[in-house]
Image (cartoon, helix red, strand yellow):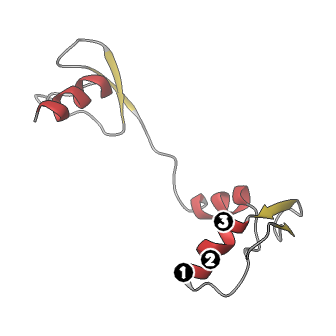
Amino acid sequence: MYEDKTLKCEECGEEFVFTAGEQEFYAEKGFQNEPKRCRNCRQARKNAGKSPRKYFTATCAKCGREATVPFEPTEGRAVYCSECFEEMKEQA
């Protein structure tokens, strides 16, 4: 029923494919209009007002390896690397 369409991005002028699957998704959601921007321009527009996430380094309380976390570690609270954190979630 749907066929891939080639559209031109309103923002950057590049051509992009509006796939049959995307068209079906748009129809299911009740969207009337086709996208006007390519995926990269949509993402850039979506993230334009956001400041980049700040990461902090900490030492994992379980294995002692260095971990990068998206929050500032608090003194006296354990911080775990992603591997140890996943292990703990599985055990719970």
Q: What residue type is labelled 1?
A: Lys
- Viewer-side residue, 49 vs 31: 31
- Viewer-side residue, 20 vs 88: 20
Write down the residue under mark 1. 29
Q: In this view, does 72 lie above or below 27?
A: above
Give the foreground label among 1 and 3: 3
Q: Residue 26 carries which label?
A: 2
The alpha-carbon separation of the residues under discs 1 and 3 comes to 12 Å
Q: In this image, 1 relative to 8: left or right?
A: left
Residue under the point 74% across and 64% down: 19
Marks 2 & 1, CB-CB < 8 Å contact = yes
Q: Which amino acid does label 3 sit on?
A: Gly
- Say which quarter of the image contains residue 13: bottom right
The C terminus - image quarter: top left
Write down the residue under mark 3. 21
Q: What residue type is labelled 2?
A: Tyr
Pointer 2 local density, CA inside 10 Å: few below 14, some 14–19, many at least 20: some
**Circle 3 — which element?**
helix
Q: In this view, does 77 lie above or below 53?
A: above
Residue under the point 43% across and 40% down: 54
- Say which quarter of the image contains residue 32: bottom right
Give percent across and percent down for residue 52: 52, 47
Residue furthest to the top in view is 64
Q: In this view, does 5 lie above or below 86?
A: below
Sequence-wise first label, 3 or 2? 3
